[in-house]
Image (cartoon, rainbow, N blue to C red):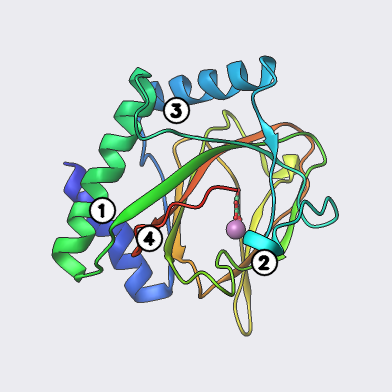
Amino acid sequence: MVEELFEKAIGRVIDSGYAVCDYFIEDKLVKGLRHNLKTLFNNDDLKLAGIGKWDHFQKDRSIRNDRIHWISDQSENTFEKEFLRLVDQFVNYLNSTCFTGIKTYEFHYALYQKGAFYKKHIDQFTNDIGRKYTMIFYLNEDWKGGDGGELVLYFANSEVKILPVAGRLVFFESHKIEHEVKPAKRERMSVTGWLKNTETKLKL
Ligand code: OGA
Ligand code: NI
């Protein structure tokens, strides 16, 4: 039951401030999304990601150097449609159980080539409070501890390291947790996005 997964993710955020949920997306969907991402890369359809917003927008390679591609709401791709349907269900569940008032969302593929990173940051721009929740879905088969590429969540007196293993979801409130992506010894793939309480869709 998909509701049990949703319940687990939401419960963990309420209890600990963040959730790590394995087997959140099925293997078939993980494979399909990974195939899409590889195709985008091979066709040179990934762009270097930016930071900041509007006039603050910059592409500072010393902060992040992953490559991204936004998933369109109108996508006709089977796997993207399945993925967005799952997000829709999750948002409906979240709104009906927690009165979160999420109105929209935006998701992108991300590919970190070997050695790529994203330095410590918060997923909310100073002049955009629309991003309420961050969701990161990992697509990497057989990821080992020694491969690096951990997501590090920083808390006042501790930190948590999370490996980007296939099927795993990481979920937290966007403005609350500083985090970082450590360089990896291999290509690191994910779909990352934000649930928002504004209609504005800003895609960088
Ligand atoms: C981001 C981010 C984390 C990850 O895209 O803002 O922090 O583990 N991603 O990919
Ligand atoms: Ni982030």
As drawn, 25 above or below 56: above
Identity of the amino acid at label 1? Val
- Real-space CA distance between mark 3 and mark 4, rounded to the nearest whole angstrom: 24 Å
Q: Earlier in the sequence, mark 4 or mark 1?
A: 1
- Real-space CA distance between mark 2 and mark 4, rounded to the nearest whole angstrom: 18 Å
Say which quarter of the image contains residue 2.
top left
Q: Which mark is residue 121?
A: 2
Mark 3, Cα crowd under 10 Å, few <14 / some 14-19 / many 20+, is many
Residue mark closest to the camera, 1 vs 3: 1
Q: Which mark is residue 196?
A: 4
- Residue 176 appears in the picture as rendered: yes
Query: At which x and y percent is residue 181?
Result: 69, 54
- Real-space CA distance between mark 1 and mark 3, rounded to the nearest whole angstrom: 20 Å
The secondary element bearing badge 3 is classed as helix
The residue labelled by disc 1 is 91
Q: Earlier in the sequence, mark 3 or mark 4?
A: 3
Left or right placement of residue 44 versus residue 15 in this view: right
Mark 4, Cα crowd under 10 Å, few <14 / some 14-19 / many 20+, is many
